[in-house]
Every structure is written in C-alpha cells, then in structure tokens.
Image: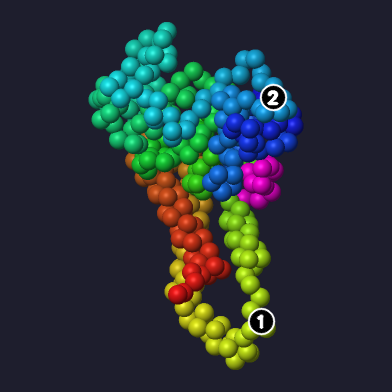
Amino acid sequence: MFTANRVSVGYGTTPILTNLSFRLDMEDRIALLGANGNGKSTLAKLIAGRLEPMSGSVERNSRLKIGYFAQHQAEELVLHQTPIDHMERALPKALPPVVRAQLARFGLDADRAETPVKDLSGGEKARLLLALATRDAPQLLILDEPTNHLDLDARDALVRALSEFEGAVLLISHDPHLVEMVADRLWLVADGKVTPFEGDMAEYRRWLIEQNRAANRSTKPDTSAQASRKDDRRERAEARKAQAPLRKIIKDAEAKLARLATERTKIETTLTDPALYADGKADEVTRLNTRLAAIGKEQAELEERWLEAEAEIENPALED
C-alpha cells in the first residue's frame, strides 16, 4: 500500500524525521506514540501526501485512497456553509440520501446537517471532518487526535466505525482507550526516528516514567560533598513529608486505574456475548458502550494526573 525508503522529511531545510524505512499494508492498525513536537503529525502528513520527502523515496499504490483527519482542518471549513454543502462538494455525484447518510453516520442529523458551520460546536465540527475524511471509502485512514472535542457518544461511534472499517488505520491520539481498542501495533516517534514499540500502553506509561527519571538524574548536581550525613537525613525526611500528598495521588490513581481496567475487561467480555444482542437488549448495549467510553476518558485523566505527580516527585520546583 505504502513504502518509505530511507526518507527524511521536515519543513523548509530542517528535517524532523530522518532515514525512515517502513511499509504499510491493508491490515495494519498502527498508533503513533511520542511526545508532542517529536514528529508524529509530520509522519502522518508524509504518508497522506501533504509533505514531500526531503531525501529518499516513497511509493504509493496507484489505487490508494487516503482519508486524512486533523483538528487544524476545521480552519478549512467554510463558516457560512452547512455540512450538507461541504459533503455535496466532496461527493459531487452522490444523491441527496447518500450525502445525508454519510453525515448521519457521525451523528449529524437532519437539523445539524443544515446548520451553518459557524453555529456548530467543536465536537460537531470534528464529526463533520470525520465524515468528510471517510466519504469515499479510503483504504487508509489517518487520524490525528480525532477525539478532541468529541463527547462520549461521538467517541463511542468513532470506535464502532473504526472497528467496522476494513482498511488500514494510522492513529495519533492521547486517548489510551481509543489506542487500545483500535491499534494492534505501536510505533514510537522520538529523536528523529520511528521505531516499533514492543509493548502495550501500560508498558509505554512505565517507559515514559523511566525516561523522565533518567533525564532528571542526569541533570541533578552532585551535592554529596557539600552536605553532611545529618543534613542529608533531614532533607530526605523533609522531602518525604513534602511528597506525601503526591505519593497519595499516585497510589490512588493506580488503584482506580486497576479497578477501571477490571471493569473494562468485564464489559468488553460481555459485549462479545451474542445473547446480549437479542431483541429487547439494545438499551443495554448502548449503556455498556457509553460506559466504555466514560472509562476511557477517566483512564486518560487519571494517567495524566499520575504522570504529573511522578514528574513533580522526580523534579520538584526549586524554592526561593
């Protein structure tokens, strides 16, 4: 589907990623990991054809259609036009029922489909962008932070749509639930390189913490020759006391994350039971999917709180 051979890519004369060699196939479901600014969106733009290689070469299947979603595309929407206007322009040969059906797949009902873009919420604009990205049945779908501004129902609809999507998916997201539900391979974008990450999201979080600890250790000055053992003991005791609230945050977050992981596993197991989809149980299916989306959001918030507390313990603010 897509092959990169020793590619460097960036902006102007400055490369962001170098010596990239990889391929994408129809069955690939890949999530990109890495800190903001490391080049995840740059890689997505290269694959989408929005950036050309500075060196090396790329090969695309001549019949490859790519659906590309990024939050900044909201700026490209025409504010005085409606979602129907945008979709009719994107699908000039489609009949009105087809146009409306594509919008309805992402929760834009008849009323919202005829509302000017300037009057849509951030979530509704994101729904419109997703509908536009998937309008012509692409074989590869590139999603850059697709759940920003989406409510729980929209996130659940996105997970369902991606589960039914038969092509390849390249995903950039800070939503761990979405990553775990959609991706079966993880790529780490860091230090100008793209490498496979052998592990799951929990292992990635632990890796991040270890990276932060290693960075902090390398920048801490050696003060052992300047402080007595008594002073060292006193400082450690004061540090433990000062860090107690942070350690409680970490402990509570870990306990809640464990409970949420158990609950999520039970729900996902329940959703695989064919009996659940018998007549009269549609409301229960909706309830379980809604709860799954809520768990994903809560996990993301807890993980962020956990990482912030860990970082503060490892690198406390200096006092005056």
Disc 2 residue crowd, few under 14, some 14–19, many 20+, Cα 10 Å: many
Mark 1 belongs to which amino acid? Ser
Q: Badge 2 is on which residue?
A: 58
Considering depth in this image, is 281 or 294 the residue closer to the camera? 294
Quadrant in the picture for the N terminus: top right
Q: Secondary structure at mark 1?
A: helix
Mark 2 belongs to which amino acid? Val
Residue 184 on the magenta span: no
Q: Position of residue 311 (x, y in %)?
A: 53, 64
Q: Badge 1 is on which residue?
A: 224
Residues drawn in magenta: 189-200
Quadrant in the picture for the C terminus: bottom left
Residue 198 on the magenta span: yes
Tell me the colour scheme of the image. rainbow
Q: Position of residue 203 (x, y in %)?
A: 62, 55
Q: CA distance from mark 1 to mark 2?
A: 54 Å
**Any mark on residue 106, and which?**
none
